[in-house]
Amino acid sequence: MRQPIVLEPTVRVAHDSIELTLPVPPSVNHQYATVKGRRLLSAKGRAYKDLVGRQILVALAQSPHRATLGQLLRQTSLSLSIHFFFASALRRDTDGGLKIAQDALCEGLGVNDNRVVEIHLYKLQDRDNPRMNIRLSIAPRPVPALATPLALAASDVVPPKSSAHKQRER
């Protein structure tokens, strides 16, 4: 049996993006704990977010792009791309790692995650080197025809029936 590769987190900072290679985040079942009826981030979840935050701080401190990147990330719409490399293709969902990865990345950068307007998730398999490659960058400008909401005539909109109305129909 082969030994898994121990992953050293890496971070690359450019003037308009940041890329990280990190361990796969804990599964949803291990991200949260229930304490006195409240859902809280578990010790594993907090440790993961701390790891991401430390990696970002070190990378930004060493980067000549930190000021430019920080300003751009706080003022523009963002695109998030995550490639999950799981040890097994069938044991994890891509969306289970999305929230904690996005939260950890945005918190580490001091960016509100509501700036993320585009998300791309990829699920791949690497038995020997499970990891996550994550990239936060400036979102491409939307195509004007696609950026406008669809116009509906009032007659096209059907109001939902109230539960009392549904019961009377039965």
Image (cartoon, helix red, strand yellow):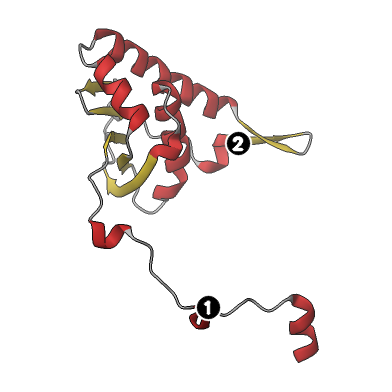
Decide if residue 21 is on the left or right side of residue 108. left
Q: Which mark is residue 157?
A: 1
**How far across and how far down the image is residue 140, in percent?**
22, 44
Residue nearest the observer in this picture, 167 or 42:
167
Q: Residue at x 39, y 28 (%)?
A: 105
SS for callout 1: loop
The 10 Å Cα crowd at callout 1, few under 14, some 14 to 19, many 20 or more, is few
In the rendered view, tell whether residue 58 sits above or below residue 100: above
Does any portion of residue 141 appear in the rendered image? yes
**Residue farthest along the top direction in this orientation:** 62
Does any portion of residue 9 appear in the rendered image? no
**Residue farthest along the bottom direction in this orientation:** 170
- Between disc 1 and disc 2, the foreground one is 1
Decide if residue 42 is on the left or right side of residue 23. right
Residue nearest the observer in this picture, 167 or 47:
167
Q: Which mark is residue 32?
A: 2
**How far across and how far down the image is residue 106, in percent?**
41, 29
**How far across and how far down the image is residue 145, in percent?**
25, 62
Q: Residue at x 22, y 28 (%)?
A: 16
Which kind of residue does numbered mark 1 sit on? Val
Image quarter in which the C terminus is found: bottom right
For residue 11, which quarter of the picture? top left
Which kind of residue does numbered mark 2 sit on? Tyr
The 10 Å Cα crowd at callout 2, few under 14, some 14 to 19, many 20 or more, is some
SS for callout 2: strand
Mark 2 or mark 1, which is nearer the start of the sequence? 2
Q: Residue at x 27, y 34 (%)?
A: 129
Label 2 near label 1: C-beta < 8 Å? no
In the rendered view, tell whether residue 1 sits above or below residue 143: above
Residue nearest the observer in this picture, 85 or 71:
71
Image quarter in which the N terminus is found: top left
